[in-house]
Image (cartoon, helix red, strand yellow):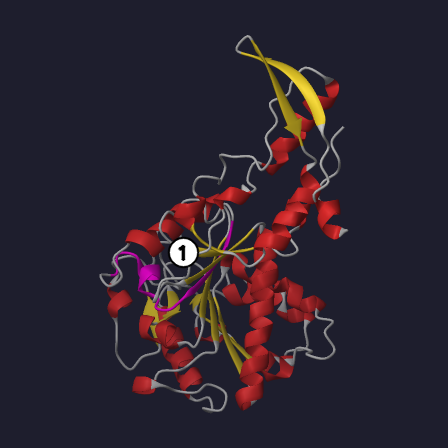
Amino acid sequence: KTFFLLLRVSFKTHHSRAHSHHTRSLSFSPRPLCCLVLMIVSSTNLSSSQVSSWRGKSTFLKTTSIGSKSSSKISHRSTRYKNIIKMENFESTPKPEGAPECTVYYTPELVSKAIAELTAESARSAIEERGYFTLGLAGGSLIKMLSGLKKDTNEENKIEWEKWHVFWVDERCVPLDDPESNFGGAYETLFKDVPIPRENLHAIDDGLYEANEGASAKSAEAYDKELKSLSETILPKGDGGLPIFDLLLLGFGPDGHICSLFPNHSLVKVNDARWILPIADSPKPPPERITFSMPVVNMAKRKVFAAVGEGKAEMAKHILEDANKTDGSIPAAMVKDAEWLFDTTGSSKLTTTHVRFEFPGTPTLLGLDTKEED
């Protein structure tokens, strides 16, 4: 019954004129067929080169009928599905060995949900293993993706906030309540609304400076000392005595910088005993900041990038497909074994990267997030 319901077809025959010839076409009801597509391909793996033919170019069901009110409505509605994959374009391919884990979600909201879920899952796994969870955060929009954690209602796997320890992969040397502070943004967006102990939020000491100028060296030294003083039960150490964070949620700039490691800056290749580095000449204001070193980033158990929106698409392609991985010109390309989460626009420039499409529960595909057109 379900199969035939989903295959419901509206056999409406229309007459239209095209190049002085009469044509006849069948127009279908797209929503049930979208459901059928989801049933068939919910876990399909695709390379982005295989889907380049459909993204933004094709409609799932295309009508050629024009002229009547009924056919005009159908033709108009079909444009809603212009980014939906044609069934014949689906072809599953295994992920090449060594290729990054890249997953595409249909909407930014689904990316946010996935980020929140993987963070909660990483926390449960770490707490089960050793009793604590360490999370490193970038600034910007990433913290907003975790706001769904405030609504945690899973009684069986409830978030154990008291066992979380949160750090910042970079920070501006400004007061913690300054709008420029990464800590301040995260606190206002998430942490003030959850029962995490304040001492488990490892912010820089803004009492060490009164102004940005001259603040980075002493702030980096103090933060480095604080992190190294933590028990290895909380923050384990790996090769070379480097810390092993459970999860780093990383952003990247339009120039490919991560943390406060900027393209071709001398700090990008620093590999010494310091975990935290001072930067006094950031190309973005304010100039004085502190940042994780690249070896510390790469030692983390799990590194995750989110590329959402058209503004991230071009650099994401560059990072994954043609940037030099060692010379420091694109610091984000130097992050090893990272996972990537995209929405459809964020992945729109990829050509050779193998991606996995995650469709289950997508409201836009099912037409559940829009009203019926007149």
User: Is residue 119 shown above or below 89?
Assistant: below
Give amino acid for label 1. Answer: His
Residue 174 placement (x, y as % from top left): 47, 64
- Residues 87 and 174: in front is 87
Which residue is located at x 40 percent, y 74 percent?
219
- The residue labelled by disc 1 is 354
Residue 142 placement (x, y as % from top left): 53, 60
Residue 52 placement (x, y as % from top left): 43, 42
- Residues 287 and 89: in front is 89
Q: Quadrant of the C terminus?
A: top right
Q: In the visual, does 176 lie left or right of 148?
A: left
Which residue is located at x 31 percent, y 79 percent?
274
Looking at this rendering, what residue extends furthest in the left direction? 327
Q: Which residues are magenta?
A: 328-343
Q: Is residue 337 magenta?
A: yes
Question: Label 1: few (<14), some or many (≥20) within 10 Å?
Answer: many
Quadrant housing residue 211 = bottom left
Which residue is located at x 32 percent, y 74 percent?
295
Residue 69 placement (x, y as % from top left): 74, 19
